[in-house]
Structures are given as C-alpha cells and as structure tokens.
C-alpha cells in the first residue's frame, strides 16, 4: 500500500509511513545506579596488603609516581557469551573536593563525598549481567597479589557495611590497586605473594560488600595510604595513569536488544526485572527494540529503525531532546510484524552521533548454535596523531550451522571514532558496523578503523575484539583476538 502512493509522494511521505508502522515508544534516564561507600573494610584490606607487601619486600611508592605515559589497562572485559557491545559505564569517579564539596577529576560532580575509587557499573540490567558472568575483571597493571578475600555474599543492594570479595595487587610501580565487590567464588586462585601480569583475570563483577548493585570499585593508593586518581584532569593530576585515558563523558551504545514485552524500568537498587530478551519471533508478533546507552549527551538523539530482511526500513523513531548528560539511559520502540512475508533476519539499527550499530532478530525458525574463530592483523600497531589505525579481522564459522546476526566490536573504551567495514565479500559503500550472517564453513573479512580523537594518546593499549552472533559466542580472548595499539 505504501509503495503505491510512495512513487509520487516519496519525499513528502518519507517519514510518515515509517512512523505509521510504530506501535509504541518509551524510555529515558536510568537513575538507579550502583554505588558504594568508603568504609573501614577497605582501609583494613589495604593495611593488611601493605603489611604483606612489606614482608615480601615489594617496591613501595609513598608519593604517586608520575610517569609520562600511564601503565594501567582498562580493568573490565566482556566474556565470550555476552551479547553486549560494552559492559559498563562509570557511575562515580574519585572525589577531590575539600570537605563535603564534590569534585571529580574534571571539576565536575560525577562522584560522591569521600569516594576514593572509580565505580564501573554493569548496565543494562546489571543483576542479569552479573548472573550471566558477562564481565570479567582483569589486572590493570602487573604486580604481586598482596591481599584477597572470597566467600562473601555477593547480592548486596543496600550499603550495610558487609564484607566484600576482593583482590589487592601491589603493582610493580609500587602502588596498591584494589578490585572490590567481586562475585563469590570468582576470586583468582593465585595465592598472596604470587605475580600477576597485566590483563590476568582476577574475578567477576558483582555486588559483595558495601554496595547497592553490580559494579567494580577500582582504587589506587600509595603505600603511605594516599589516594591516587588515575584520571588526569583540571582537578586531578596533570599526567594520566591510564595507558589510554577514557573520556570523562564516554558516549556509547552499550547494547541493542529485542524484547517480547516493553523493556522494564528499574525503580530501586534491589530491582531485578526480567528484561524478556527475545531474538526470535513469529509473523504478526509484537517486537520491542531497545537501545541502551551510557553518557548520552543533550545533543545526541538516537534514531531507532526496524529494518526488513531486504534492507528496507520498516519503521523509524527519533528520540526527543534531553536536557543534560544521562549517565545511563534507554530508549525503545515497538512494531507489529506483518502477518505474512515477514520471515527472515530483521535488524534494529540505532544511530547515535552519526554512527550506526545493529542488532539482528529472527522471524521464523531460530538458528541452531555454531562456533566461530577470529584473527586480527597486524597484532601490534602504532599511528601518529591524526592518522587512522587499520586492522584486518577475519571471522570464520567452523561449525555446521549458519551464524546469524553477528556483530564485531573492539571491547575497550576508545577516545577514537572506530568503524567496522566488511571487505570480503565487499559490503555496499558506506555500510558500516552492520550485523552480518556467516554460512557454515565460510569466512568473512572486515576492516576495523580506529581514528583517535584530538588530544588523546594511547601507549600500547590492548584491544580485545568481541564477535558475537545470535547463535554463537565470541571466540575466546587470546593472542589472535587481541591487538595492541599506540597513538
Ligand atoms: Zn566505589
């Protein structure tokens, strides 16, 4: 019907017929975010670690060491079975304010009074992500384990002063790094006194200790007990301690999902609603498509489109303006699928700041599970300021079933514009970051481009490549699926 009138009135009707297919829309800011509280528990864990470090004759740093390049890798990574693009947002930075004043490293107020660490919160539906063991904690820098604890209850949703599961590493630079609130039973089996390399898995994110929801509290102290904020900024030190400092407002799409019901909001920190994720639907069914964001800026509306198997837009919605940065937000729209001719792989496409990302869903029969491998070349690369780093990624389906709705993302905060383009077989020009299918036994090649933003540097950061499909997990992280980049 639309096609017949669209021939003559295409320009005028471009938006209207698409909107007419939309059933309902919703979403907004998520204000319930995990927090914690500095308390005697953390001080006691640090003092115990300092005693052990002294007994082990490890290097001490009584004042923060200032180096020209930082030595910290980002401490969170997606695990292979996560279907997210990113695992977390930052809910609280270190507080530099005197007295009760709030002051994060940028002189903003994204902190709470007396907070001495950085809270990295799982989003969306953090309890689900925790239960699915979707995000692992990796050592930010090499060192020696000087304290750890496990066996504590890990579903705290109020700050009650409970004990946490944790690891403290005396880094080779002499600073102590605390990884707090871990999942019960997940803490590394490496003993106190044992060395860890940067990137070694220390445990999983959860909500043990004084915590209101699943997050990592990452904190650095000197052996004199002084707080060290790894973020450089106007209200912090001049030199970052990160190998690549994440942006203070790090706008990104964390996840795109389809649901069989309206995506539930969250009204208290103990709330753990069933998101009712669904990737397979029957013709005529209602489909809710949702986009989950961190650090959405006031000038960044999201365009959510439902795309038919033939590539045509079925329905589209542009979210309204917001008045300030939302640390965590979500937006959703729903459609009723056509009762006939709907079978195939559909997509939800989300456009943010001019970039598009996709999530696929199936109308008709669900695909059976398959297995992928991936390899990235070159494994080490260095580009000068203003240049673009290019990596070639090959993805192969080594299983006996077709892989459906696959996406490829670099899993690390990047102060850079990155894009993934399919090059073998070539995708139409300008089609970036598309969800793709991959037949059994076949491979596809992609070009991952990373263009650093002005003023940002990176010294040998590790970038894990996460490739996941509706019916396949990302290949295990290893030398072939992680690259090292300097800019
Ligand atoms: Zn914290």
Image (cartoon, grey):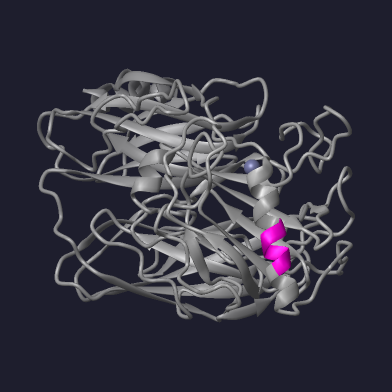
Q: Is residue 181 above or below residue 289?
A: below
User: For this rendering, which residue is in front, 96 or 36?
Assistant: 36
Report the side of 445 relative to 300 (left or right): left
Where is residue 195, by image quadrant? Answer: bottom right
Residue 239 drawn at (x, y percent)? 86, 59
The residue nearer to you, when weighing 247 against 447, is 247
Q: Position of residue 302 (x, y in %)?
A: 51, 32
Prevailing SS of the magenta stretch: helix
Q: Is residue 477 above or below residue 361?
A: below
Q: Is 25 a magenta residue? A: no
Give coordinates of residue 268: x percent, y percent.
46, 23
Image quadrant holding the C terminus, namely bottom right
138 to 142, vertically: above or below: above
Out of 99 and 387, give the one closest to the viewer: 99
Image-quarter location of ligand 1: top right
Front-most of 310 and 483?
483
Can residue 246 be spotted in the picture? no
Is residue 173 positioned above or below 236 on the image?
below
Q: Is residue 278 something one can see in this rendering?
A: yes
Q: Which residues are magenta?
A: 47-51
């Amino acid at each position: 019907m639309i096609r017949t009138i669209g021939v003559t009135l295409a320009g005028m009707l471009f938006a209207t017929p698409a909107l007419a297919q939309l059933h309902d829309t919703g979403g907004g800011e998520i204000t319930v975010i995990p927090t914690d509280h500095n308390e005697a528990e953390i001080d006691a864990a640090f003092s115990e670690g300092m005693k052990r470090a002294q007994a082990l004759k490890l290097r001490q740093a009584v004042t923060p060491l200032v180096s020209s390049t930082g030595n910290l890798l980002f401490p969170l990574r997606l695990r292979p079975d996560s279907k997210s693009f990113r695992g977390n947002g930052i809910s609280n930075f270190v507080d530099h304010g005197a007295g009760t004043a709030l002051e994060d490293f940028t002189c903003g107020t994204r902190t709470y009074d007396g907070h001495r660490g950085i809270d990295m919160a799982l989003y969306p539906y953090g309890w689900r992500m925790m239960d699915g063991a979707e995000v692992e904690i990796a050592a930010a820098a090499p060192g020696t384990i000087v304290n750890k604890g496990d066996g504590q209850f890990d579903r705290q949703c109020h700050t009650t002063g409970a004990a946490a599961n944790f690891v403290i590493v005396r880094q080779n630079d002499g600073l102590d790094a605390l990884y707090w609130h871990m999942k019960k039973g997940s803490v590394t089996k490496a003993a106190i006194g044992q060395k860890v390399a940067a990137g070694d898995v220390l445990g999983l994110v959860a909500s043990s200790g004084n915590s209101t929801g699943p997050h990592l509290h990452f904190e650095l102290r000197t052996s004199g007990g002084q707080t060290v904020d790894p973020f450089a900024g106007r209200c912090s030190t001049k030199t970052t301690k990160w190998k690549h400092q994440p942006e203070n407002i790090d706008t990104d799409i964390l996840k795109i999902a389809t649901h069989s019901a309206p995506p539930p909001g969250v009204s208290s920190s103990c709330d753990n609603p069933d998101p009712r994720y669904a990737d397979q639907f029957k013709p005529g069914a209602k489909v809710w498509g949702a986009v989950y964001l961190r650090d959405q800026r006031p000038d960044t509306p999201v365009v959510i489109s439902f795309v038919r198997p033939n590539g045509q837009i079925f329905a589209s919605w542009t979210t309204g303006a917001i008045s300030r940065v939302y640390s965590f937000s979500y937006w959703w729209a729903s459609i009723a699928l056509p009762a006939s001719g709907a079978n195939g792989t559909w997509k939800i496409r989300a456009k943010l700041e001019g970039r598009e990302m996709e999530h696929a869903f199936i109308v008709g029969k669900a695909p059976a599970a398959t297995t992928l491998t991936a390899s990235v070349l070159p494994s080490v690369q260095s580009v000068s300021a203003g240049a673009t780093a290019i990596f070639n990624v090959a993805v192969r389906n080594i299983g006996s079933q077709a892989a459906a709705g696959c996406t490829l993302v670099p899993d690390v905060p990047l102060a850079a514009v990155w894009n993934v383009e399919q090059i073998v077989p070539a995708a139409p020009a300008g089609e970036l970051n598309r969800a793709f299918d991959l037949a059994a036994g076949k491979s596809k090649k992609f070009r991952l481009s990373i263009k650093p933003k002005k003023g940002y540097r990176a010294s040998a950061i590790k970038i894990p490549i996460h490739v996941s499909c509706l019916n396949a997990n990302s290949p295990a992280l290893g030398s072939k699926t992680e690259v090292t980049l300097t800019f």
